[in-house]
């Protein structure tokens, strides 16, 4: 995709901020020619190599390439156009108004297992699509899962700023996501892989069904220690109403050895995601009634 050097403001009307990332601000905008609404993600360009502001062009290009390869999938946010106005690269993205899954949880403290499993099923379809293209997201967390609209279950994965193609040859080690969601191999600077995303899915599931975070400590270092020790419990204070199926799903993802961790494909056929039988569906519902 070519970066247009047309002046962005001559083709789009720009409105309110709708979100932000570490090096990006996202604003609602309207394409003048079509009156269609989009999300304009302004990513500041790094002017000098030694500067800490903004991102180098090749890092920005990685997010554009990943979006180009993936965005025809209904769970991945779609990319409409790209502009370079000198100071920023502007990604014109599909507009999603339902807010972050993160806010949705905070309002509810925790979700029912049906709702959590339905969200996870969609996230896993998106992650499966990415992994089938050898692309790892590497920053999966509830903030990067947007709801299409408040009351609906449909979600979109956003922010592929840390995503990259994982090839065995090029060992990627230098990454750091968000402490709560990083896998042991990231903390230990070992080669990252697609399984790194599956660990994050395990943490997200734990949070969705319990409202608490498995490895979060009082400091980033304490969190890293908990992660590398795989030190977590199903504290009865939060898990008394959680089904064994849900706990089994989480246990198969929070595994230190990347070769033993469930893959995205395998997780889609785990009974907590894809109930095989009426009684398993019943078990999930029962766990729910105990909790109410
Ligand atoms: N870092 C972020 C942050 C956001 C978005 N993208 N990247 C986004 C994308 C499409 C619609 C809405 C948003 C707002 C949040």
Image (tube, rainbow, N blue to C red):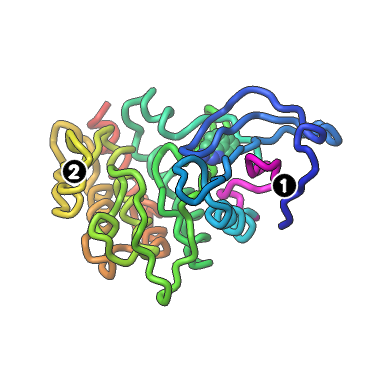
- Magenta segment: 72-92
Seen at 36% across and 26% down, the residue is 106
In what element is the residue under mark 2?
Answer: helix
Q: Which mark is residue 221?
A: 2
Q: How many marks?
A: 2
Q: Position of residue 110 (x, y in %)?
A: 32, 30
Location of residue 187 by image quarter? bottom left
Nearer the observer: mark 1 or 2; the answer is 2
Neighbour class for label 1 at 10 Å: few (<14), some, many (≥20)? Answer: some
Disc with the residue nearer the chain's start (1 vs 2): 1
Seen at 50% across and 39% down, the residue is 23
Residue tagged 1 = 81
Asked whether the viewer can see residue 16, the reply is yes
Front in this rendered view, residue 53 or 30: 53
Q: Position of residue 271 (x, y in %)?
A: 34, 56
Q: Position of residue 114 (x, y in %)?
A: 38, 40
Judge whether residue 79 is colored magenta: yes
In what element is the residue under mark 1?
Answer: strand
- Quarter of the figure with the N terminus: bottom right
Q: Position of residue 285 (x, y in %)?
A: 32, 39
- Quarter of the figure with the C terminus: top left
């Amino acid at each position: 995709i070519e970066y247009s050097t047309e002046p962005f403001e001559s083709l789009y009307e720009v409105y309110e901020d709708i979100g932000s990332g570490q090096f990006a601000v996202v604003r609602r905008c309207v394409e003048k020619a079509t009156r269609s609404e989009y999300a304009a993600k302004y990513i500041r360009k790094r002017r000098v190599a030694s500067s800490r502001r903004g991102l180098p062009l090749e890092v920005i290009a990685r997010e554009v390439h990943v979006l180009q390869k993936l965005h025809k999938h209904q769970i991945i946010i779609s990319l409409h156009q790209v502009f370079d106005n000198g100071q920023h690269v502007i990604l014109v993205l599909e507009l999603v108004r339902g807010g972050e899954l993160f806010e949705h949880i905070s309002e509810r403290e925790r979700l029912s297992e049906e709702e959590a499993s339905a969200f996870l099923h969609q996230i896993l379809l998106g992650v499966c699509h990415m992994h089938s293209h050898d692309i790892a997201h590497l920053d999966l967390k509830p903030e990067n899962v947007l709801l299409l609209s408040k009351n609906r279950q449909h979600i979109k994965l956003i922010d592929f700023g840390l995503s990259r193609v994982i090839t065995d040859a090029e060992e990627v080690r230098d990454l750091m996501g968000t402490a709560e969601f990083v896998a042991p191999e990231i903390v230990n600077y070992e080669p990252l892989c697609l399984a790194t995303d599956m660990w994050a899915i395990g943490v997200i599931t734990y949070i969705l069904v319990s409202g608490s975070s498995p490895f979060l400590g009082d400091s980033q270092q304490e969190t890293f220690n908990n992660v590398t020790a795989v030190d977590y419990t199903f504290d009865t204070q939060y898990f008394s109403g959680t089904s064994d199926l849900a706990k089994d799903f989480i246990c198969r993802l929070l595994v230190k050895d990347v070769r033993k961790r469930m893959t995205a494909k395998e997780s889609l056929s785990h009974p907590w995601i894809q109930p095989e039988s009426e009684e398993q569906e019943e078990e999930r519902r029962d766990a729910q009634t105990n909790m109410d």
